Image: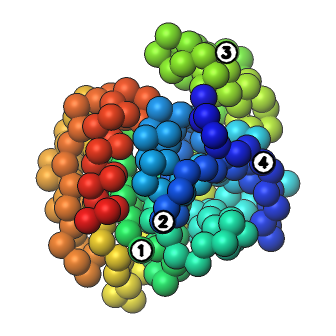
Amino acid sequence: MFDNFRLEMIDVPETTLRVRHGGKGPPLLLLHGHPRTHTTWYKVAPILADKFTVVCPDLRGFGKSGKPSDPYDHEASSKRAKARDCVALMEHLGFDRFFLAGHDRGSYTAFRTAMDHPARVEKLAILDGVPILEALERCNLRFAQQWWHWFFFAQHDKPERAILADPLAWYGGSEASMGKENFADFRSSVEDPRTVQGMLGDYRAGIHIDHLHDLDDRNCGRKLTCPLHVLWSLQDDLEMLYGDVLSVWQPWSTLPVSGLGIDSGHHMAEEAPAELAHELISFFTA
């Protein structure tokens, strides 16, 4: 897994990140979602490494990266804080500007990085996500049925106890579906109390502070200035919830937004790696 990639722990100003990086070419930062770690990219990253220097961290709070000391410190778990981690990480590796792709919860950090640090992000790819503010403002019965966990995960203490009582029953996953090493890394995360707490902090920040950062951007007229490409899993629920996914994103960008659906379940990097890699290569090399 990740042949010819280097694995290391890298200190950034506010935390320590576990990072896998390799390849040659323009820098491309890949951000995983919940409840995965950077190993979710194990099929995609080697394909991309033929054309890019690929950087795959565990986000703050996830995997083997550092955890906020206070799980209810929403600023420490915010996408704004994680965006600072991303910029500092890429600076550490020698990159002032980079391509960026984020999946699921990682898409929110990717979006915030491009919004807060527009000079750093050359192009942005969003996978299976819409802005947090859009998700919350459009919350209806269908959203509540599909994404009820957003609100449960934001509660105090109860979600940790529910998840840790039987993590694999809660999240699913298997060696057969995820690959042996990827599954082992995922399992070590969802069975670790501090990591579960760190991952849930991402949801708590979303409900309490991240959407306010989005709202401030909208009220001030701030928009993405880099090219934006949006991909979503056709077997997941984004089209069911929002219909035309690109129309949700267009008001947040100064440029026309491109994108399409990929025939996959939610974890497209694991389920449709060739199609995903093709889309990312086409977008980032255009």
Q: Give the residue drawn at x 63%, y 50%.
A: 21
Q: Nearer the viewer, residue 276 or 15?
A: 276
Q: Give the residue drawn at x 50%, y 39%.
A: 46
Depth-wise, is mark 4 or mark 2 nearer the camera?
Answer: 2
**For residue 285, side relative to residue 181 (left or right):** left
Query: Badge 2 is on which residue?
Result: 26
Q: Secondary structure at mark 4?
A: strand
Q: Earlier in the sequence, mark 2 or mark 3?
A: 2
Q: Earlier in the sequence, mark 2 or mark 1?
A: 2
**Residue 122, horizontal then vertical, whole percent:** 42, 74
User: Circles 1 and 4: CB distance less than 8 Å?
Assistant: no
Q: Give the residue drawn at x 35%, y 43%.
A: 277
Image quarter for residue 188? Answer: top right
User: The residue under label 2 is which amino acid type?
Assistant: Pro
**Residue 204, horizontal then vertical, whole percent:** 61, 52
Q: Is residue 28 above or below residue 216?
A: above
For label 4, count other residues whose C-alpha is less than 10 Å away and answer few (under 14), some (14-19) or many (20+): few
**For residue 49, side relative to residue 80 (left or right):** left
User: Circles 2 and 1: CB distance less than 8 Å?
Assistant: yes
Q: Earlier in the sequence, mark 1 or mark 3?
A: 1
Query: Badge 4 is on which residue?
Result: 8
Q: Secondary structure at mark 2?
A: loop
Q: Check the image and name the residue furthest to the right.
A: 69
For label 2, count other residues whose C-alpha is less than 10 Å away and answer few (under 14), some (14-19) or many (20+): some
For label 3, count other residues whose C-alpha is less than 10 Å away and answer few (under 14), some (14-19) or many (20+): few
User: The residue under label 3 is which amino acid type?
Assistant: Asp
Q: Is residue 212 above or below residue 221?
A: above
Image quarter for residue 39? Answer: top right
Q: CA distance from mark 1 to mark 3?
A: 42 Å
Query: Badge 1 is on which residue?
Result: 122
Q: Nearer the viewer, residue 85 or 158?
A: 85
Q: Earlier in the sequence, mark 1 or mark 4?
A: 4
